[in-house]
Image: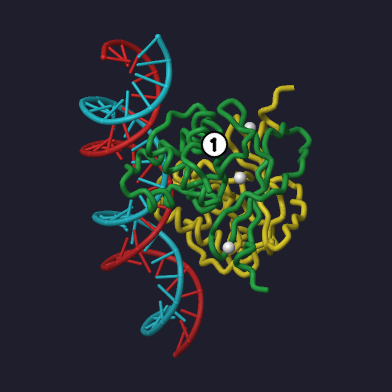
Chain colours: A green, B yellow, C red, D cyan
Amino acid sequence: MIRYSEVKRILKSHNLRITDGRIDILEFILRANKTISIKDLEKEFKSLDRVTLYRTLTSFTENGLLHKIPDDSGHATYGLCHNTCDSKNHYHDHIHFKCNECGTIECLDQNVPAFKVPGYLVKATDVILKGVCKTCVIY
Amino acid sequence: MIRYSEVKRILKSHNLRITDGRIDILEFILRANKTISIKDLEKEFKSLDRVTLYRTLTSFTENGLLHKIPDDSGHATYGLCHNTCDSKNHYHDHIHFKCNECGTIECLDQNVPAFKVPGYLVKATDVILKGVCKTCVIY
DNA sequence: CTTTTTATGCAACAAATTTGCAAATATTAA
DNA sequence: TTAATATTTGCAAATTTGTTGCATAAAAAG
Ligand SMILES: [Mn+2]
Ligand SMILES: [Mn+2]
Ligand SMILES: [Zn+2]
Ligand SMILES: [Zn+2]
């Protein structure tokens, strides 16, 4: 169970102002326990302006609460950062999984391996696995 | 040097109808020897309708001539498939590199490692490295 | 409580992508 | 080669996605 006070604390600790909208949105993201897109927010928060949702995603991302996950669908998807991220340090080393059946993108508890490319300076690595997720596989 | 007859042969072998536009576009992609976006095509082919360019990218991709590379910028980028792909089989196992300086995305000659996730069925893997590319690094 | 800073809503804009349909072109069959 | 058939193209219009400016509301700081 996620409490209001906890949601508020998280916003504060990321230097984000506390507003009703942000509390509701963050609570929704925490509860959902999966990655979200602008579409998900639009569906859930009919009362909030679309522009506000975009801006919320942007400030949450800038302040290390969310990270943007690359996808070839054209729809940006965001995942919760693990508690190590803030506005200054955004560091992610986990891999992602996109399910071909249900479409959800998950952050997995598995780290990316190190890649070395001669002549290139590698600063970040994204790994997106595609296939059938845990809840969609038929045994 | 890429010859007209060769371009035509490639289109045919991927079950794509031969049209002037497609020949020009494919020749351009082959010559460019790097990944391309709709923007690149629009800049190069002023005489072709934007809609046609979109449709060309789509059919080239569906028929295994191009592959779409996931990116968090929202702009789709496409790379040439290696000769093993066709409409039925789209198999890619190379990694990609996106340069933070010049913005180009490259297909690298390095294969993705195998990932295993308990309970999940992994069918494809995308790896996108980010950093500074060969031509942008300062020695 | 007052001032300052930031967030929100609204309208308008801009860019990216899609759709329908008629005309043009390519392929196939005769 | 020509006629029939299938697919592609261009154009106009719609849709979807994301951005910007600005006045107002709300939050944080003093
Ligand atoms: Mn993640
Ligand atoms: Mn590639
Ligand atoms: Zn699934
Ligand atoms: Zn570069």
Q: Nearer the viewer, residue B74 or C21?
A: B74
Image quarter of the C terminus of chain A: bottom right
Q: Which of A66 and C30 is in front in this view?
A: A66
Q: Position of residue D15 (x, y in %)?
A: 32, 56
**Residue lying at 57% horizontally and 46% vertically, measured from the top left:** A70
**Count of number-bearing discs:** 1
Q: Where is residue B114 in the image (x, y as percent from the top left)?
A: 77, 55
In this rendering, would A57 be left or right of A109? left
Look at label 1 and name its amino acid: Leu
Examine the image and state in which quarter residue B88 appears.
bottom right
Indicate whether A138 appears above or below A38: below
**Residue lying at 57% horizontally and 54% vertically, measured from the top left:** A105
In this rendering, would D2 be left or right of B80? left
Q: Which of A138 and B74 is in front in this view?
A: A138
How packed mark 1 is, by other alpha carbons closer than 10 Å (few <14, some 14-19, many 20 or more), is many
In this rendering, would B114 be left or right of A29? right
Examine the image and state in which quarter residue A87 appears.
top right
In this rendering, would B85 be left or right of A39? right
Q: Position of residue B39 (x, y in %)?
A: 47, 43
- The local secondary structure at tag 1 comes to loop
Chain name for mark 1: A
